[in-house]
Amino acid sequence: MKPVTFSQKYIRPILNAKMIGIDMTCGGGNDTRFLADHIMKVYSFDIQKEAILKAQSKLHDYHNITFINDSHSELDHYITDKIDVVMFNLGYLPNSTSSIITKADTTIKALDALYKHLNDKALVSLIFYRGHDGGYDEYYKVLRYIKDSPYKILEHYQEYKDPFEPVVYILTK
């Protein structure tokens, strides 16, 4: 099962129309769409204007999405709501240059800032793509942060045992 499929299957049963969520890495807008189909409000972050424009174009019929062209580490500047579900799909924008990637320091800053915004039973999904330059470093540092943080790991998934394949973590408060 693909990591995105696993993440969505895990999260889907808890979603309802009263929830608020964040796609921390908008990318092509797939997680944004998934959330917007099931919950009341979605914030969708990406540092690349190209990603935001593509997702806005693809999701123009949705009225429950707020796109934010900024780093997810800056979420405190945009979010005042209590959050029920969060999705991180780390790495780089698919079908784009891989020179712009998510990095451990901003992902950790985002997780740190996010914690106080989460409702008690909120779920946070993180997909790490460890096979690109910088991917394994981000995975290692963020996982070390998570293990020393107040987050609880509910689930860990990877299809095989290859150290460079994608891996999913589901967290809660």
Image (cartoon, rainbow, N blue to C red):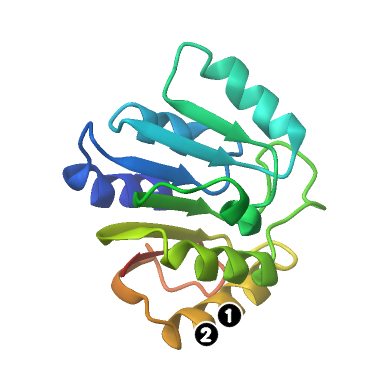
* Residue type at tag 2: Arg
Residues at discs 1 and 2 in contact (Cβ within 8 Å): yes
Q: Is residue 51 left or right of residue 125?
A: right
Residue 155 drawn at (x, y percent) = 28, 69
Q: Quadrant of residue 78?
A: top right
Disc 2, SS: helix
- 162 or 168: which is nearer to us? 168
10 Å neighbourhood of mark 2: few (<14), some, or many (≥20)?
few
* Residue type at tag 1: Tyr
Task: Identify which residue is drawn at 31% across, 58% down.
Answer: 123
- 138 or 131: which is nearer to us? 138
Report the residue marked by disc 1. Answer: 140
Quadrant, the C terminus: bottom left
Between circles 1 and 2, the one closer to the viewer is: 2
* Above or below, 24 relative to 121: above
Total labels: the figure holds 2
Alpha carbon separation for disc pair 1 and 2: 6 Å
Residue 54 circle label: none
Task: Identify which residue is drawn at 28% across, 31% down.
Answer: 38
Task: Identify which residue is drawn at 53% across, 65% down.
Answer: 113
* Above or below, 20 relative to 59: below
Residue 116 drawn at (x, y percent) = 42, 66
Report the residue marked by disc 2. Answer: 144
Task: Identify which residue is drawn at 37% across, 76% down.
Answer: 151
* Above or below, 1 relative to 172: above
- 5 or 152: which is nearer to us? 152
Q: Quadrant of residue 5?
A: top left
Disc 1, SS: helix
Residue 171 appears in the figure? yes
Q: Is residue 67 left or right of residue 22?
A: right
| Residue found at the far left of this picture | 13
